[in-house]
Amino acid sequence: MSEEKLDRLLALQEVDMEIVALEERREEIPRRRAEAAQEITALEEEQSRLQDALERIRLDRRQRESELETERSQLERYENQLNEVKTNVAYSALLTEIQGAKRKVEELEEEILELMEQREEHEERLEEIDVELDEKRASAADELDALAAEENEVEAALKEKRERREELAERVDSRLRQLYRRLRRRRRFPALVPLRGQACGACYGRLPPQVVREITHDGALHPCEACGVLVYTEPGGSGTGAAEAAGESADAR
């Protein structure tokens, strides 16, 4: 194979590798964007939970206060009835009711106090969240603007590279282009690697001396039996000396 054909195919592969790198960079942007907003999302979710909790506290407190008012009214009636009872039995029973009503009043007052403390804690935390959200949103805005600019830059670079790829693909020998395309479809990338001494430049598996000779002397492309990529010799023949030595050694045997 002529050096010119190889150069064209290598140029196509180089652009393909640049396109892959740009596509991977573009795919990372949504993840980075989500990370930039992650802390904000967490704070907003906590804010929502606290607001819901405050509403529940408000309703619970209203219910407890209503119950407390009922119990206090009942207690007052019991206390007024003390002066009306005629027997010790009735008087003792009424005292028991009064003690029960007082315990209930104390319990409700304690529950209301706990609800008020919870409300204060939630309101303090909500104030802190408001401050944190302002700071995080300001910081995230800069990050998101930078990501948007990067995304536009990547899209522009991809457009340019894809146009360049079309131009290069037209100049590549059709047979080589089809072979290269098949390797790419099989996710062999890079599909072409240089010979390194007597080894494949991708997996470093040793190649047979005859194959090494064909690559170095005839400019042939040979598939690596170990990993399947196409092995070529670089212009100027890096590794050629070692390859020739291997060939001479094989001939001597």
Image: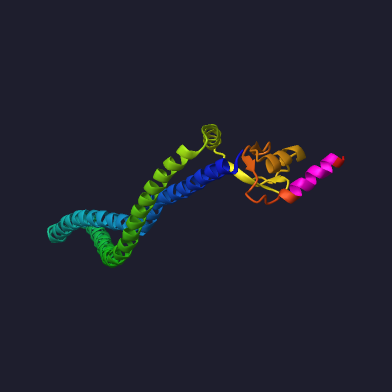
Q: Is residue 222 left or right of residue 29?
A: right
Residue 154 in view here = yes
Nearest the camera: 112 or 142?
A: 142
Q: Is residue 202 left or right of residue 212?
A: left
Q: Is residue 230 above or below residue 127?
A: above
The colour scheme used here is rainbow
Identify the main secondary structure in magenta. Answer: helix
Residue 189 in view here = no
Q: Tell me where residue 49 appears, x and y as whole percent.
A: 29, 54
Is residue 245 in the magenta section?
Answer: yes
Q: Tell me where residue 211 appears, x and y as whole percent.
A: 72, 38
Q: Tell me where residue 103 appears, x and y as whole percent.
A: 27, 60
Q: Tell me where residue 28 appears, x and y as whole percent.
A: 42, 51
Per the rendered image, the range of residues in magenta is 242-251
Nearest the camera: 82 or 25?
A: 25
Q: Is residue 182 left or right of residue 214?
A: left
Residue at 73% across / 41% down in the picture?
A: 213
Residue at 74% across / 46% down in the picture?
A: 243
Q: Quadrant of the C terminus?
A: top right
Q: Quadrant of residue 85?
A: bottom left
Q: Is residue 225 above or below residue 18?
A: above
* Total marks placed: 0
Residue at 26% across / 61% down in the picture?
A: 115
